Amino acid sequence: MSSPTNPKQLNEDRHLDSTLRPRSFKEYVGQEKIKANLNILIEAAKKRKEGIDHLLLYGSSGLGKTTLSHIIAKEMGVNLKITSGPAIEKTGDLASILTNLNDGDVLFVDECHRMNKTIEEVLYPAMEDFLLDIIIGKGPSAQTLRLELPRFTLIAATTRIGMLSSPLRSRFGVTFRLDFYEQKDMEEIIERSARILKTDIEPSAVQMVAKCSRYTPRVANRLLKRTRDYAQVRGDGFVNQQIAKEALKMLEIDESGLEPTDRRILQTIIQKFNGGPVGLQALAAAADEEQDTIEEIYEPYLLGSGLLGRTPRGRIATESAYNHLGLKYNKKEQDKLL
């Protein structure tokens, strides 16, 4: 069973996300610099009666990359087509998607770092010149058919920008990094979602849920939903501080938003590797987790919270991690290990 603080989208979240998703930049809380830049891009493109440049969004899961693509398409008054890197397995899949677009349409490709290199190479002329080269046949008799494409805008999203090839990155006119949200932004997001869900929640409960939401809107909405369910079953439907505390405790989420897997990763580094440094492969084996799961889901928050550090020799548990787990930190010994 997936954890409630996993920022990856679950099937059960899709309807929830569509209900709670902001419909405009005004409703979209946080990421103020990105919104300001996008507003200028969109207004300038409208005045020129053109589409906006290809756009690359990167950052941890659940920060709002898909939501931004919806808003951009709506502000431009065009259609949005959504796919993902793993879904485009063959060049024929990409050709089918691109040839079914209309002028000005936005194509959103999630997890673009998982596209294979063959697909990337076909995408280059499509992004630059709006042309698609299709090879028909094999061997000496093979022929290349060149098709003109509509002038579309590609918005690509990734959690692993380092895995994108330089040729692909260079073809995006604009690149934005989405950062973790501030506490006040998280509280505003939860208050807005509670209104949409018609859930009464007191300010202290909002603050508690926000603090445990890993600075991530998708996690905040998921925890709000679980807290609301708890309030309806164990209370009268009103979410007060005590109800929120009990709901989060049942979900095994502590006051800093850490779940059992987060704590197990930190405990593994401390207890099995003397606080580190330890390589990702060894850590994954010792903690019984996939390397990608640690790197994409748990590590960004642990790093952002100052509980985990990365050195050239591997991951280390910080003094804050020791304090959080109630363990003694010996600075002299740790300095020797580093």
Image (tube, rainbow, N blue to C red):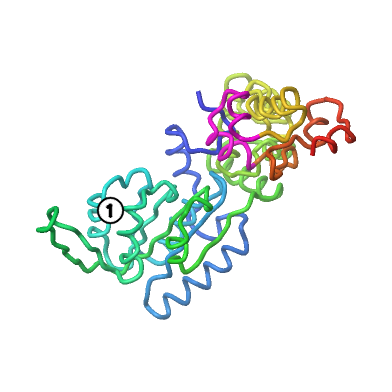
Front in this rendered view, residue 164 or 334: 334
Residue sitting nearer the eye, 128 or 185: 128
Name the side, left or right, on which 76 lies relative to 330. left
Between 14 and 113, the residue placed more toward the observer is 113
> Looking at the image, is 170 positioned above or below residue 215?
below
Q: Please name the residue shown 32% across and 53% down the image.
A: 119
Q: Residue at x 56, y 69 (%)?
A: 37
Residue 278 falls in image quadrant: top right
- Which residue, as the protein is rendered here, is positioned at the far bottom? 48
- Seen in the picture, residue 265 relative to 31 is either above or below; the reply is above
Q: Quadrant of residue 308?
A: top right
Q: In front: 324, or 103?
A: 324
Instruction: Determine whether, in the image, residue 141 is placed left or right of residue 265.
Output: left
Q: Is label 1 in a helix, a strand or a loop?
A: helix
What amino acid is found at the position of numbered circle 1 in the picture?
Leu
Say which quadrant the C terminus sits in: top right
Specify the segment rendered in magenta.
279-300
* Residue 177 place in picture, x, y as percent: 58, 57
Residue 59, position in %: x, y?
56, 51
63 drawn magenta: no
What residue would you read off at disc 1? 94
Q: Position of residue 87 (x, y in %)?
A: 33, 44
Note whether 18 is above or below 135 in the view shown.
Answer: above
Q: How many marks?
A: 1
Which residue sits at x=69%, y=41%? 313
Please provide percent x and percent y for residue 321: 77, 33
Which class describes the residues within 10 Å of circle 1: few (<14), some (14-19), or many (20+)? Answer: some
**Residue plotted at (28% across, 53% down):** 94
